[in-house]
Amino acid sequence: MPYITLENDKLKVTISSFGAEMQSLFGKADATEYLWQGNPKFWGRRAPHLFPIIGGLKDGRFVYDSQPYEMGNHGFARDSEFTVESLSETKAVFTLCERKENYPFDYLLRITYTLKRNRLKITYTVKNKGKRKLYFSVGGHPAFACPINPTLKYSDYFIEFEKEENPKQPLIQNDLIDGYRILPIQNRRISLLNSLFTQDALIVERPNSKKFRLRTSKDGRQIEMKIKNFDFMAFWSKPTDGADFICFEPWCGIDDKADGIRSLESKWKIHCLKPGKTFRCAYSITAT
């Protein structure tokens, strides 16, 4: 499980080839670790990538071409060894194209990390290498330390939206979309409490905002995420005191609907690529 490092005078980023998962996002100016460092008591991962599904499947399986396939939540990319395609001081490219028994498609997933000043950009490229349509979802799941400043509390922080959002949004129950909920958005902000996540992630469908910030009024350190070409923006943590992290999750795709059917082609918000075609989406993290 080799680790690689991207570094400039602002940030130092450590990434594992296993899952192409970021392990550290370290700000040099104030010696601050912005990425959650994992704790199996709450959640052991740090910034997994989600592919070829996002969330849960109904009964843990999908059907394609009359054949059932089992797949766990969020797919297999996060538990796969990636190939390092190229590497420089400020850019790393990882690829995954291993054929899987539970995913009957020829695909290429490329994840590119690009570091520029205090911003890290993550780009997903999905290519259909086969002769039939490719069905997939892809997204990110980075967890940020919260509080960023360890002298503050989790409840000192809030999520800030760039624009006004519709508070009525999809509700996840038992890893499936089952109804709607009203998000506690006030003045384009959601104040953080672990109890917000007793009903799983907070989801915004077709967000008006393209920028989201994790910040506090008591300190200048903050995280900003900017997204491009994603269908959903989700926020998640464990509903347990001491779970000092918050995930910002840009998604192209989502869980199955509780009343939906298992056909992959008919899955809600599934993406489809014709043979030879390519799909891209990207998000950036700016640490201030």
Image: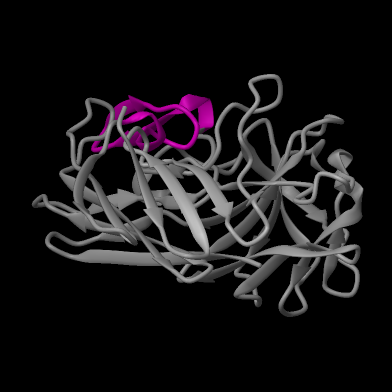
Q: How is the image coloured?
A: one colour
Based on the picture, tell me whether residue 76 belongs to the magenta stretch: yes
Place residue 61 in its image quadrant.
Answer: top left
Q: Position of residue 131 (x, y in %)?
A: 8, 52
The single residue placed furthest to the left in the displayed view is 131
Residue extent of the magenta highlight? 58-80
Q: Residue at x 54, y 50 (%)?
A: 25
Total number of numbered discs in the rendering: 0
Q: Position of residue 112 (x, y in %)?
A: 32, 58
Residue 252 appears in view: no
Place residue 97 in its image quadrant.
Answer: top left
In the depicted view, which residue is nearer to us: 209 or 2?
A: 2
The single residue placed furthest to the top in the displayed view is 41
In the depicted view, which residue is nearer to us: 243 or 208?
A: 243
Q: Quadrant of the C terminus?
A: bottom right
Place residue 161 in its image quadrant.
Answer: bottom right
